[in-house]
Amino acid sequence: CSFDLNNVSFANNDTIAYVAGQTIVLWSLTDKRQRFLYSSEMREKITAYTYAGRRLLAVAMRGDKPEVHVYDHKNFRRKKKMILSIN
């Protein structure tokens, strides 16, 4: 089994995050549990994600109307949705 470390980032001191298709996987190193951020609104493939501080997670998706969703890292509630529109 191979694992690409270029696609892994630390969400905080004990949690790593990586993309698996349309899902962000958060794996806790302390209790060896996984949490999954999957939204029915994320219909397209995730192209990028980042953490703002230790509280917010931004996820970008490609598509006809590219979108960025901002979530609370602790409870996965969406805080903001931005859609790129070209006029």
Image: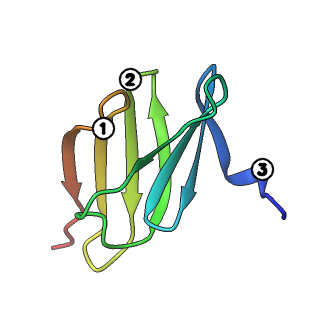
- On the image, the x and y values in percent for residue 57 come to 40, 37
Q: Secondary structure at mark 1?
A: loop
Front of the two marks 2 and 1: 1
Label 2 to label 1: alpha-carbon separation? 10 Å
N-terminal of the pair, mark 3 or mark 1, is 3
- On the image, the x and y values in percent for residue 72 come to 30, 31
Quick one: 83 or 31, which is closer to the camera? Answer: 31
Quadrant in which residue 4 is drawn: bottom right
Q: Which mark is residue 55?
A: 2
Quick one: 26 or 42, which is closer to the camera? Answer: 26
Front of the two marks 3 and 1: 1
Q: Are marks 2 and 1 in contact (CB under 8 Å)?
A: no
Q: Which residue is mark 1?
A: 76
**Location of residue 25 with respect to 30 vertically, above or below:** below
Q: Secondary structure at mark 3?
A: helix
Q: Which residue is mark 3?
A: 5
